[in-house]
Image (spheres, rainbow, N blue to C red):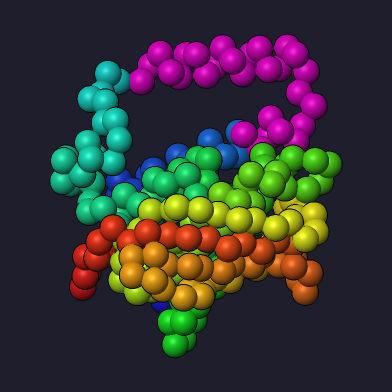
Amino acid sequence: YDSEDIAAPIGDYWQARRETSGKIKALQEHLQTTGMSTESVLALNEQLDNLLNSLPDEKKLLGRNAWLAEEHFGHNGVMHSETTPILGASSPIAPEISLWFNEDRSKVLGKVTLSWMFEGGAERAHGGVVALIFDGLMATAVALKGKACVTANLKTDYKSFTPIDKELKLEASIDHIEGKKVFVKGEMRDGETVTAICEGLFIVVGDLPKRD
C-alpha cells in the first residue's frame, strides 16, 4: 500500500491467475456491451461448454483456509490481495481498484473504475457495489493501525449518481477508536463531486502479521 500502483504478483501462478481473470472480465464486458445475436450467444455457450468439460479434474479448495493449507500459494496477505471480491487482483468479479496509504499513513487513498458490469440505473453504478467498495476501503484504513478487523456496520449516504467507466477517487481515515471498536469515515468522488460518503464500525479481531 505504499504506491498507487497495484503490487506485482507473487510468482508465476498468481501472474497467470491475473491474466485469466482479465480474460474472463473481457468476456463479461463483451456480453454486457454488445448486442450479440442469439446464434452468436448459443455458439459461445457451446465453446464454453467444451472448455469447461476439458478442464482437468483438480482438487477442490473451498475457502481461504483450504488454500492456506496448501502453503505454496502464499500467506494470508497474498490470498487477500489476490482473491477477495473487492480488492482481489486475480478475482474476475473485482472492480479495477487500487488503494494506497498517504505519506504520513493517516489516510487510505484510492482510485476505482467501475465497468459496465456494475451498472445499476442507466449509466450509473449500482448502490450495492458502492457500499462494497467502501467496505474494502475502510477496512484497509484499520490496517493502517496494524489490525485485522471484521465489519460490524456500514452507513452509506448517496450524494450523487456514481458514473460508470470513469475513474473515481477514494479516501478513508479513522475517526476514533473505542477499545476494539474502530470508527471509520470514507468518501467517493467523481472529480470534485462527492458521489457517496460512508461511516463504518469495524471490530478488531487481532494483529496483522508483520511482513518483511
Q: Quadrant of the N terminus?
A: bottom left
Q: Quadrant of the C terminus?
A: bottom left
Residue 26 image offset from top left, x and y in percent: 60, 39
Taking the spot 42% from the left edge, 67% from the top edge, the residue there is 182
The correct choice, above or below, for 112 with respect to 211 in the image is above
Taking the spot 48% from the left edge, 60% from the top edge, the residue there is 201
The correct choice, above or below, for 120 with respect to 193 in the image is above
* Residue farthest bottom in this picture: 104
What main secondary structure does the magenta stretch of the protein show? helix
Between 22 and 206, the residue placed more toward the observer is 206
Count of numbered circles in the view = 0
Is residue 114 visible in the rendered image? The answer is yes
* Residue farthest right in this picture: 122
Taking the spot 78% from the left edge, 48% from the top edge, the residue there is 124
Residue 10 image offset from top left, x and y in percent: 29, 57
Taking the spot 74% from the left edge, 40% from the top edge, the residue there is 120
Residue 179 shown left or right of residue 103 in the figure: left
Q: Is residue 202 magenta?
A: no
Between 204 and 47, the residue placed more toward the observer is 204
Is residue 97 visible in the rendered image? The answer is no
Residue 137 image offset from top left, x and y in percent: 51, 62
The correct choice, above or below, for 182 with respect to 125 in the image is below
The residue stretch that appears in magenta: 28-55
Between 24 and 141, the residue placed more toward the observer is 141
Q: Say which quarter of the image contains residue 148.
A: bottom left
Q: Is residue 54 magenta?
A: yes
The correct choice, above or below, for 88 with respect to 110 in the image is above
Between 9 and 189, the residue placed more toward the observer is 189
